[in-house]
């Protein structure tokens, strides 16, 4: 059924796990009675996304700093130095 495939595709885009997608598919049959469970599952996914965004923002700031240091450096490579330092 096409609507089921579209539903699965959208859940994948939202980065739900296979287990989460399975749960959503089960709840899809009776959404009114599954609302609390769907909300809980989605709230958990939202927290995971927020954590990922925090980590990505930190990485963005670090990479920006390294690119700027590299641009301003006349010696060596601050990017390589930082990777070696943290490795």
Image (spheres, rainbow, N blue to C red):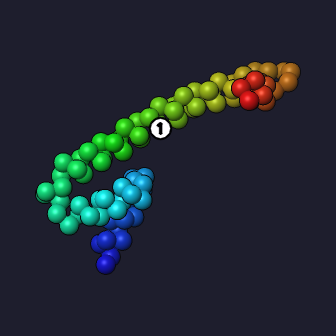
Label 1 neighbour load within 10 Å: few <14, some 14-19, many 20+: few
> Is 80 placed left or right of 63 in the picture?
right
Residue furthest left as drawn: 32
Q: How many marks?
A: 1
Q: Residue at x 33, y 42 (%)?
A: 44
Q: State the SS at label 1.
A: helix
Which residue appears farthest toward the bottom when viewing the image? 1
Residue drawn at point x = 42 percent, y = 54 percent = 17
Question: Which residue is tagged 1?
Answer: 52
User: Where the N terminus falls, by quadrant?
Assistant: bottom left
Q: Residue 64: x and y, percent?
A: 63, 28
Quadrant where the C terminus lies? top right
Q: Quadrant of residue 45?
A: top left
The percent position of residue 78, horizontal first and vertical second, equals 77, 24
In the image, 22: left or right of 81? Answer: left
For image coordinates 18% across by 48% down, the residue present is: 36
Give the answer, above or below, for where 72 lies relative to 54: above
> Where, by quadrant of the figure, is residue 25 drawn?
bottom left
Q: Is residue 29 visible?
A: yes
The answer to whether any part of residue 70 appears in the image is: no
Q: Position of residue 82 (x, y in %)?
A: 74, 25
32 vs 79, left or right, is left
In the displayed structure, would residue 78 be above or below residue 48?
A: above
Percent across and percent down for residue 6 are 35, 68
Q: Left or right? Give the position of 46 relative to 27.
A: right
Kindly identify the residue that appears in the image at 53 percent across and 35 percent down. Answer: 56
């Amino acid at each position: 059924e096409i609507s089921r495939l579209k539903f699965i595709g959208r859940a994948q885009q939202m980065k739900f796990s296979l287990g989460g997608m399975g749960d959503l598919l089960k709840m899809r049959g009776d959404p009114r009675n599954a609302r609390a469970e769907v909300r809980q599952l989605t709230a958990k996914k939202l927290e995971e996304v927020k954590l990922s965004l925090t980590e990505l923002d930190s990485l963005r700031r670090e990479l920006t700093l390294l690119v700027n240091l590299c641009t301003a450096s006349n010696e060596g490579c601050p990017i390589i130095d930082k990777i070696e330092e943290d490795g």
